[in-house]
Structure formats: C-alpha cells, structure tokens
Image (cartoon, rainbow, N blue to C red):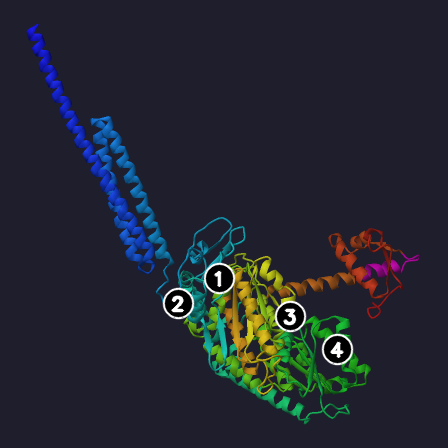
Amino acid sequence: MASISGAAAAAAAAAAAAAAAAAAAAAAAAAAAAAAAAAAAAAAAAAAAAAAAAAAAAAAAAAAAAAAAAAAAAAAAAAAAAAAAAAAAAAAAAAAAAAAAAAAAAAAAAAAAAAAAAAAAAAAAAAAPSSGVCGLRLRRDHLPRSSYLGLARSNSVVYSTSSSPNSLTSKQSGGHAHAHEAVDKDPIRLWNRYVEWLYQHKQLGLFVDVSRIGFTEEFLRRMEEPMRGAFAAMRELEKGAIANPDEGRMVGHYWLRNPALAPNSFLKDKIETTLERILAFASDIISAKIRPPSSSAGRFTQILSIGIGGSSLGPQFVAEALAPDNPPLMIRFIDNTDPAGIDHQIAQLGPELASTLVVVISKSGGTPETRNGLLEVQKAFRDAGLDFSKQGVAITQENSLLDNTARIEGWLARFPMFDWVGGRTSEMSAVGLLPAALQGIDIKEMLVGAAQMDEETRNTEIKENPAALLALCWYWASDGVGNKDMVVLPYKDSLLLLSRYLQQLVMESLGKEFDLDGNQVNQGLTVYGNKGSTDQHAYIQQLREGVHNFFVTFIEVLRDRPPGHEWELEPSVTCGDYLFGMLHGTRSALYANDRESITVTVQEVNPRAVGALVALYERAVGLYAYLININAYHQPGVEAGKKAAGEVLALQKRILLVLNEASCKDPVEPLTLDQIADRCHCPEEIEMIYKIIQHMAANDRALIAEGNCGSPRSIKVYLGECDVDDDMI
C-alpha cells in the first residue's frame, strides 16, 4: 500500500509539475499573443497614418504610394507573426487559442487598413497631372485599337503588311469595324493637343486643326512605314510614272501649276503656251477686241459652259467662290441632259444669246450629256438666226471628235485637254482656268496657291504636311475601310459648292471595288455637306444625337468682310461673330458627344486660298489611296454606267422596231409587255421594257399605251402611225 501510495504521490507530483509547466507555457503563449496583438495594433496605426499621409500628399503621390506599400508589407509580416503565435497558443490551451484568434483578427483589420491606404495612394497618383509637354496620356480609350495591332477578332478589320506592294492593306472580315470609344474631353489636355498638332502655312494664311480626331501616338507609329511608301509613290507620280495601267497614261495635274516638273520639255512648253493663250484670249474677250457678230451690245456679256462631272463641278465651285460681284461676263452652266434644265438656261439668256460665248468642255467630245447639251444649244442658235461657230469655244483633247468638229466648222477658239489630266483634277487646266479668267478671276494667283500647297505637301514630316494629316485622319476616323462618312461644312456662302466639288474628287477617286492586288475590297469614303450655319437648321440635329457614322470637316474663313466694310449689329457684335459662334459652338457640341472633326481655316476666300484648297485635297486623296491600296486615278464604275445607259437606248430602238412591225399590220396588232419582250428576245428585260414604254408615252413619242400603267400586265402598246421614222420617234 505504501509503495502504491508513494507511486501515486510521485505521479501526482509529476502531474502537478506538468500542469504547472503547461500553465507556464500557456501564460507564455498568452503573453506572446498579447505581444502579437499589440504589434498588430501598432501596424494598424501605422497603416492609418500612411493612409492619412497619402490623402494629404496627393501631389507627392509616388512617395505616398511607397509609404503605403511599406506599411502594407509591415502589416502583412505582423499578420504572419500573429497567426504563428495564435497557432502555438491553441496547441497549449483554449484560453491561449482565444487570445491568438483575437490577435489574428486585429492583424487582419490592420492589413485591410493598409490595403485601403495603398489604394488611396494609387488613386492620388492617378489623379496627378502629367508632366509631359502636351499632357497627353495613352488612356484606355486612347490605346491603339486591336485592328491596328494586327490582332484578328470577330466583326473587325484586320490590317496586314504581307500581301501588297504597299505597306498597309485592308480586308473586311464580314462585319463592320467597331465604333470609337469616348474621346478625351479634358480641356487642358485638349488645348495642349491643339497646340501640338496645329498646322499653319503663313504665306497662304491656312491652318489645319486635327486635335478633335482621336488618333493615338501608337497609331502614328504604326502608320510611319505606310506613309513613307505613300510619299515615295507620290514622288514617282510627279516624275511621270504610269498611274493608270489600264489606260497606259500618266497623272500630271501637279505639272499644271509648276511646268518645270513635267517629265519632258515638250509637255512643259505645252502647259506654258496654253496658259499664255488662255490669258490672251480672256483679255481679248473682256476688252471687246473679240466681239460677237450679231449683238447690239458690241461685246460678249455671258458665258454658257457645257460640260459634266469634273468639266463642270470645278468651274462652278470657282465661279461661286471667286467671281466678283460685277464680273465682265456672267456665267451659266449646262451640266446635265435634262431637257427642262437646258431650256431654262437658254430661256434665261433670252436676247443675250447673241452675246453669249459658249464654252464646250469634253475630253473626247462624245460624252452623251455634253454632246446633247451642245446639240440643244446649236438648235437654239439656229432658231434665233445666229451663227454658232462665231461664238463657240472647244476645250478638248487634240484630234478628238469635238476638236475636229470645231476645227472644220471654224469655231472661235480651241484649247487642249491633256490625256494625263483627269476630269476631277482638271481645275488648274484650261477646263477651269479659261472660264475663271473670262470672269475676271486672277488665275495666276490660283496657280501660285496650288503650287505653294504642292510644295508643302511634299514634306515627309507628317506634322508639317497638311495633306498627310488629312489622309491619316480619314484613315483613323473611317478605320481605313470608309465606315464613316465625311461631312463637309464650310461656314461661308461663297464656299457652298466646295462639298460638291470634294464629293466628286474624293468619291470618284476612292470608291473602288478592287484593290491593286485584285482583292475585292469595295473601298470608298462618302462625302456630303452644304454650308453653315444653314445646316444648324437641317441635319446637324442628327449629327449631334443620331447615328454615329460620320466625322466632320469644318471650313472656317477668318475674314468676314473686306476691310472697311465692318458693321456691328449690336455693341461689339457683328453678323460674322454670330457665324463664328455657330461654327465653334457646333464643333464643341459635336465633340462633347464623341463626334470627331477636322477644321481647315483660311484667312479669306481669294484665288490663292482656293488654289491651295484644291491642291490640298488632291494630294490628300492621293496619299489616302496609297494607304488603302487602291488606284485613285481610274473610274471603271463610271464607264460601266455609261455602257449600261447605252444598252437602255439600244433596247429602246429594238422595242420601236417590234412595235413598228406590229403597227403596220391590218388591223393594227397591239402588243402586251410579254409579247414585246418575247419578240425582242429579251424576256429578262421586261421591267426595263415597261419603263421605256412608260417614259415614251409620257412624252408624246408616237407611242400609244392603253390600259392601267399602275397594273403593267394590263397594258397594250402600239404606234400611232406605221413606218414611224427616227425623227418622229
């Protein structure tokens, strides 16, 4: 018993010692936990201090961020230590575990506070202004789009550099390119961007502002190589490279304002001689040295210009922009084959037809609209008992049908059109210069302005080349595939026709089905516009709030009236101030709604400025055409339309032959549309047959259509007479 009791006592003592040791360990653990909790609390306090410092020192964002990061690291270390201590305490005793848990919670709170401090510091750093010259940042909405980084994605445009002689080509992947994201509207950054990208030509008084087009620095870097190729291609063009292989001809409208650039002395002499002849002829007409033979006025008083497309749009634009209020000769245009329109122009001349100089402009002389206008005017001269040849002038290619006709009939004068000048780039040739000179416009100044702009747009520094800026902005705004329209808004009445002129120049040049590699691309850039501020009350509403499928080109003219003619509507406010306010108010309102724009500014509308504008856009079109890998200098679609028109007229003659045969029977055999189509051997053309018959019947053309035209199958057709000849038809 004694031994058992001793053993028990020894065991009890050992247990007591163990308990004491455990208690001591627990106490130590608790102390460690308490120390850890204190450390965590200290860390939390440090984190809070760091957050306060970050908020107070936004300007020193970098330092605050560093401090916050250090605090966060300290808090994390403290949290780790607290967690270790808590684990040890839990192994020792429940009380120690509870203490450790409390310490861990405190440490977690400290870590959260440190993270919040770091976030506050980062936000302060992001809000700090940039130290760059123009304050431009590649924000998320300004980063280069994936299409320009060569990244394929659904409904995107993919650009590559491997399948074309040009360094940039485009392919459509089955959907529309994505819309631009919101533009940067920070006023200070916009001002800096405006200053950085503003182009000025001091001699011409011309500015180009592209700051409201949201291109990025990355985009410009991506476009450096393609632009080098475009500049090289333009240099080759000016040297006389064949730009239109399907016609085997050069493109040399640049030589017209600087004949020294022509590739040989023959062309140089031809250009210079033609200009001298234009100036001399215009002087003789204006001074009445050359007079109409049958006019009581004793001088020419009117010009009637007959032409279409580039043979009319350029001269009309220049006449509207530059003709003086009282020109030596007034000008009218016949630019269509509309009989009523032709009749109106002739009627407006009235007795002044006898003092009208008729200028007929056609490269071949076979253009249907121009030929028809000429024939109608010649008939009017015959009806008035006048000799057309004494008042007719031809501008045409040498040895063309028109040239030979004018030479044989002894017209008053003939001037050359060159085969290396396309209609839409012919304003600085006889096509545009002769009508302008006859109105008293200084055509030498036009040529000077164009030559100065040509020189400027040969510059390979993009910021110093306004045409390059325009071409790149067009590319950016339309994703290089024409998915945005270009709205041209000149805030000047005299520039009303600029949008129509640019419409042909841009759309006929860039609207192509195939690229230079034969790929079907259906390229183009749609152009439309009218004038400001008239358009404030027309389609600006849609531009501001409707479909976002455009970018705007504002044309600004700084001088409102000639010096000495200023007048204030109210104190310190003129009509021109209102126009200025409308322009810039519209520009700002559009940009506020993410609508991009370009602004081209001229000091005043004068011959030099107009010549510069023409040359600026001619060059921009050429550069942009290279970027999208198409030929800007041919127009197969125009020729296709002419061919289709000829086919309609050929079908009309076949219809008349069929009807004539049926109408000569006894009794007359009226024919249905199906019968006519069958006998013409073209049942697939039955709709066109109906339209031809409808048109002829409406114009009393010896054709009778019985039935209801609203129900085409009920119609029966015959001729009113048998053996109707061509004149009666």
Majority secondary structure in the magenta region? helix
User: Which residue is at the far right?
Assistant: 667
Q: Secondary structure at mark 2?
A: loop
Q: In terms of depth relative to the viewer, which is nearer, 426 or 20?
A: 20
Q: CA distance from mark 2 to mark 4?
A: 56 Å
Which residue does the image show at 12% across and 16% down from the upper left?
12
Single out the mark in the foreground, 4 or 3.
3
Q: Amino acid at mark 1?
A: Trp
Relative height, residue 663 to residue 320 (above, below): above
Residue 539, image x and y in percent? 63, 64
Single out the mark in the foreground, 1 or 3.
3
Q: Quadrant of the C terminus?
A: bottom right
* Number of the label disc, if any, that sits on residue 534: 3
Residue 87 relative to residue 502: left or right: left
Which residue does the image show at 57% across and 88% down from the upper left?
276
Q: Which residues are magenta?
A: 656-668
Mark closest to the chain's N terminus, 4 or 1? 4
Label 4, on which residue?
345
Relative height, residue 641 to residue 116 (above, below): below
Label 1, on which residue?
476
Q: Quadrant of the N terminus?
A: top left
Residue 218, image x and y in percent? 40, 60
Q: Residues within 10 Å of mark 4 (few under 14, many from 20)?
A: some
Residue 128, image x and y in percent? 36, 60
Q: Residues within 10 Å of mark 2 (few under 14, many from 20)?
A: some
Label 2, on which residue?
134
Q: In terms of depth relative to the viewer, which is nearer, 204 or 230?
A: 204
Q: In terms of depth relative to the viewer, which is nearer, 145 or 228?
A: 145
Q: CA distance from mark 1 to mark 3?
A: 28 Å
Mark closest to the chain's N terminus, 1 or 3? 1
